[in-house]
Every structure is written in C-alpha cells, then in structure tokens.
Amino acid sequence: MVVRLDVLFTNGRFRTLDPARPAASRIGVIAGRIAGFDEELDGSVAGSVIDLGGAPAVPGFNDAHHHLSMRGLRLSELDLRDSVVGSLDGLYAAVAARAAELPAGAWIRGAGYDQNKLGAHPTRTALDAVAGGHPVWLAHTSAHMGVVNTAALAAMGFEPDSVPDVDGGTVVRDDQGHSTGLLTEQAQGLVFAVLRPAPYDDFVAAIGAGSAAAAADGITSFTEPGVGLGRVAGNGAADVAAFQEARRRGLLRLRATLMPVSGALHAAGAYEPGADWFGLDLGLGTGFGDEWLRIGPVKVFSDGSLLGRTAAMWDDFSGEAGNRGFFQEPVEDLRAFILRAHAYGWQIATHAIGDRAVGFVLDTYEQAFAEMPRVDARHRIEHAGVTSDADVARMAALGVIPVPQGRFVGEIGDGMLAALGPERSRGCYRLRSFVDAGIVLPGSSDAPVVNGSPLAGIHDMVNRHTDSGAPFVVEEALTAEQALRAYTFGSAYAVHDEPLKGALSRGKLADFAVLSDDLLAVSPERIRDLAVGATVVGGEVVHDAGVL
C-alpha cells in the first residue's frame, strides 16, 4: 500500500532526542504528526516535499515560562533596555521623543529598564520634566515594579502625597512622604487599575506579534504564566478568549498552555450534593483543551524578585540591612489557596524566588501531599531562584518541578550577584544540582524579562557567565545535550505533554527547529551565535529565514 504523506522533509540532519532512533535525514508528516523516518518512508508519496539543504534540526523548542502576550505588548512600547537607551539620560531622552509624537493626554508606556545597569530608577519628577504633560508608566524589566510620573498619579486619582500603601507591595516615598513614582509588586495594581485590560483587539494583536517573535526563535510550544485579570500577570477577564481568537485569525501559530492567575479560581457552585466546586466555571481545570490551546497549572505568586530586592529571603539583601524582601500576601492565605487548589485537582505553579519563599512553598506542597495524596501532580516552583541543598532534595522527593531561567545568568546575572553576595550566590539559579538529583528540568526564559531566544538560554545554561564576563556559579553548568533536553522534553514534561512533544518520534507532533549549525557539535562558546533558519509546527512552516 502506498502511504500518502501531507509533507515530506528531506535532506536534513535531525537530532531526534529519541534513543531508539537518535538521527534521521527524512521525516514524513500526516495530519501534523510524524508518520515515519528515512527507510520507513520508501515508496510513499507526498503532497509537498521540502528540502532542508543538509541543515541540522532539533525538536521544537518549548519555553516553560514565557509571557508571550506581554512580549507582544512590549513590542509597541518604548524599549528601555540599557542596550537601547544606554543610560538614564538616554531613557529620559526616549521619553521626551515619544512625548513629541503623541496627542495630548496619551499615555507614554515603556518597559525593560534595569536600575542595576542604568545606575538608578527613573523618578517621577525627572519624568515630569520630559513628558510634556503626558502620563507615563515605565515597567521594570522584571515586571515586578515600575515608575509613574505626576500626570499618571493624577489619572490614577492621587496626588504625590496621597498615594495609599498597598499590602504585598511598596509605594516608595521621599523624605517628605511624596511618592518617588516607584511602585513595586502589588502596588503596581494602582496603575493597572487604569491601564488594564488593554483593548481586546490590541491584546489579540499582541498575542500575534509575540507568536511571530517566538517562532523566529525556534519556539513551537510555550506556557503563558498568568492569564486573567491579575495584580501582576494577566490582562483581563477574557484572556483565554483572546488566545482563541488569535488562533482563529491565524495569528497564534504556536502551541499554547495557559496558566490562569490564582484570582481566576473561585467557588463555582455545587457540583454534587453538599459539595461546591473550586476552580474555573463548569469544572474546567488543568489539562482542558487540545494540542494547540489548553489550560495548564494555576499561577500563584508568593514573593517578588532578586533584581528589585523584593524576593522573600531568610537573610538581608547584600548592603541593605533589614531588607529581606516580602511575601505578596499573607502566608496563611497562600497556604490555604494552594491546599484548596491541590484538593480540586489543579497542577500548581507558584512563583518563588527567595530561599524563604521556596522553603514555604515546599512546606505547603508537602502538607498538601500528606493530607490529600495525589499521583503525579507535578506541582512547580517558578524560578526557584535561591535554593538550599536540602530544598533541592525535597523537590526531588516530592516530584516538584523547579522552573529556573538560564538566560537570567547572562542578562541580569550581575544584578542578582550584587543582591545576594558571594556566599548565597552559590545557590542561585541552580541547574546541575536539579539534574543530578534526578529532577526533570524544563527550559524557560521568562521573556520579555530577558531575551526569549532558547539558543541564548541554552548558551547560558552551558557557559554560566554573565554578559559582562563574570563567572556565575559555573559548577551548575549543564552539557549542551542536557540543556537541549530541558528546552524540549523537560518543558513538555512540566505540563504533562511528554507523550506528544519533546522528541521526534513516530506518532508525536511534527514540531522542529532548523538551525544554522549542529547545536550538539559546536563549541560551547559558539552556541549563542547559532541562528534559527526555520520553525515547523505540525509539519507547517511558521517561520522561514530564507532557508527553505
């Protein structure tokens, strides 16, 4: 019998990551799935044949923690990364230039600045001097803080001396008690109450823009950590509908797993006599959806960030006596939510960066498993920024998945080292410790906090130096193969998707990235110089840099 393929990819050098067939030169695709390789395809016919020209290819990159919608939104905002503005004066000049372009009263929005690189945060009064009366919101690269000017405060309903304190966040004030403009963590909700949600069509377009940017990075799947009207992540009440609409319009061409923010879960009425459902309406929960768009874990925030020195730590941040960060809400409220979500079958992904926060989350997961045993829950700790040896062992014993970001090392590593000091830095953004403990490690970027390129992330996972050249706990480095496995199989495993993704095998999804050179053969220092030539999702080319 003649096998009729939808598409046949030939003349490739595929690293399949399947031990049963580690390499191939031809892949046949039927209905978006891999139908066979090489000699298995002899005698078949194909609707189309695509010659890879001898290029190497790997399973599609899967980013386990990627704010794709935020990435798309930021593409329309002022780019305030130090590589673009160069200095604090350059940032102010960029704000002034944007002010000259906008109609009166329009908001000036920018993102990506890092006070560790610019020397200081922008200030309310300095922004007033250059903004021409426009309200201004500048988001820090971490998305855990940002700065407003006086016109923005007025739009929010406040004077500089009347901004209220916010639990789980900080309104930074000067010696006279006036707001400096800097809002951290939950205090950002004061400005989000005015700016969110973005118009629906704008948000749909941002998903499309983020999808195109991620496809150019070789990403075929991603997990969006926070949809719904949240205080830090998420946009509005119809975020899932916006992703569905982006998919219908052909704008979202990648596979998406969406994490509802914790605030989206609620008591949803009776589901059996004498018992109420807790979660999303109609009993929707982790795993609902299809291979293109599905609901994943619930996203919970426990603490802040290392760059902003708001992560919950056991000891003071370096050079800041008395500052040990903080939790974003009372720990007993966090504990109660996690236990309840666990009881109703949710996979849970809790943001925890400081060692105190990581320890608390593990304590709570351990309590949940002891009181309500579940098989293969795969609860996660997003970032797991500072971990002790004991907590690494506890993660392994509990089956908890840490989700650290490799690219943090290069792009913001200097700021994290400064926040922690040399002794505690040894536990910062571990990788090898997790792998050696037997944990299935995912790969992720937290884009747009840092560059979303998996190749840049893999480079840092292997080389472990900051972009300034400083070594960053080099004993935590992985091999290139381990890092690639994290960005493919590991990220699929982190959302129970490994039956379909993570390797190129018969029956699995035909998702792969074509590269400029063999990732597993080049010298480690050359990994970041590799380029993505094409990205294929379900046998369809969704990005082509002129290779195909």
Image: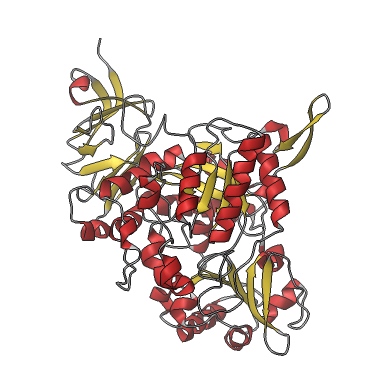
Residue drawn at (46%, 47%) of the image: 393
Q: Is residue 251 left or right of residue 285?
A: left
| Image height of 317 relative to 535, above or below | below
**Where residue 229 sits in the image (x, y, percent)?**
67, 53
Q: Is residue 201 visible?
A: no
Q: Is residue 45 left or right of residue 146?
A: left
Q: Nearer the viewer, residue 406 or 354?
A: 354
**Where residue 347 sits in the image (x, y, percent)?**
58, 39
**Where residue 363 sits in the image (x, y, percent)?**
60, 48
- Report the residue that reaches farthest toward the right: 274
Residue drawn at (55%, 55%) of the image: 358
Question: Where does the N terminus fall, quadrant-wise?
Answer: top left
Residue drawn at (67%, 59%) of the image: 231
| Image height of 347 relative to 301, above or below | above
Counting labels gives 0
Residue drawn at (28%, 36%) of the image: 17
Q: Quadrant of residue 234?
A: bottom right
- Report the residue that reaches farthest toward the top: 1
